[in-house]
Image (spheres, rainbow, N blue to C red):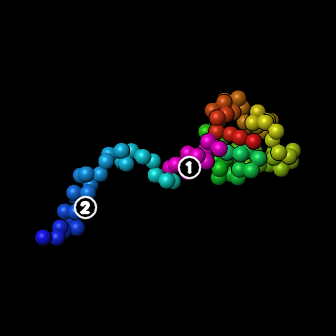
């Protein structure tokens, strides 16, 4: 039996690969989405906090500084005490945050 060239083999495999695999997020995407949805505001660093909607590096730093000065947050709503964090930012991220 003749051997298939690598190019032909790749073409055949690509043709018969289920399309459902193409629409699945990559492992990195899955990890990023999970990280965004499970941010512990008492432990998160600047990089993690910056993943939140409306939170850049300055607001992330403000959250960390507030935490260092006043201690751990007892509620996600305590973020409203951080300068620059308002109701809109809190409501946009409410489901992503945990204590």
**Residue occupying the far right of the picture:** 70
Q: Of residues 52 and 20, which is closer to you in this image?
A: 20
Q: Which mark is residue 32?
A: 1
> Which mark lies nearer to you, 1 or 2?
2
Residue 68 image offset from top left, x and y in percent: 83, 50
The secondary structure making up most of the magenta span is helix
Q: Circle 1: is it few (<14), some (14-19), or many (20+) Cα within 10 Å?
A: some
Q: Which mark is residue 10?
A: 2
Residue 44 image offset from top left, x and y in percent: 71, 50
Residue 41 lies left or right of residue 71; in this view the side is: left
Q: Of residues 62 and 32, which is closer to you in this image?
A: 32
Residue 12 image offset from top left, x and y in percent: 22, 57
Q: Is residue 66 visible?
A: yes
**Residue occupying the far left of the picture:** 1
Q: Which mark is residue 95?
A: none
Residue positioned 61% across, 48% down in the render: 35
Badge 1 marks a residue whose secondary structure is helix
Is residue 19 rendered magenta in the image? no
Is residue 33 rendered magenta in the image? yes
Answer with the quarter of the image where residue 73 lies: top right
Badge 2 marks a residue whose secondary structure is helix
Residue positioned 68% across, 51% down in the render: 46
Magenta span: 29-38
Residue 61 lies left or right of residue 15; in this view the side is: right
Which corner quadrant holds the C terminus? Answer: top right
Residue positioned 56% across, 49% down in the render: 32
Q: From what the image shows, is residue 43 above or below residue 53?
A: below
Q: CA distance from mark 1 to mark 2?
A: 31 Å
**Residue occupying the far front of the picture:** 1
Q: Is residue 58 visible?
A: no
Residue 20 lies left or right of residue 68; in this view the side is: left
Q: Of residues 31 and 73, which is closer to you in this image?
A: 31
């Amino acid at each position: 039996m003749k051997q298939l060239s690598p190019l032909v083999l790749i073409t055949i495999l690509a043709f018969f690969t289920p399309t459902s695999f193409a629409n699945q997020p990559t492992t990195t995407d899955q990890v990023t989405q999970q990280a965004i949805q499970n941010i512990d505001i008492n432990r998160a660093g600047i990089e993690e906090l910056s993943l939140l909607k409306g939170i850049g590096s300055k607001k992330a730093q403000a959250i960390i500084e507030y935490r260092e000065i006043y201690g751990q947050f007892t509620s996600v709503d305590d973020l409203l005490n951080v300068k620059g964090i308002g109701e809109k930012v809190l409501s946009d991220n409410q489901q992503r945050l945990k204590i």
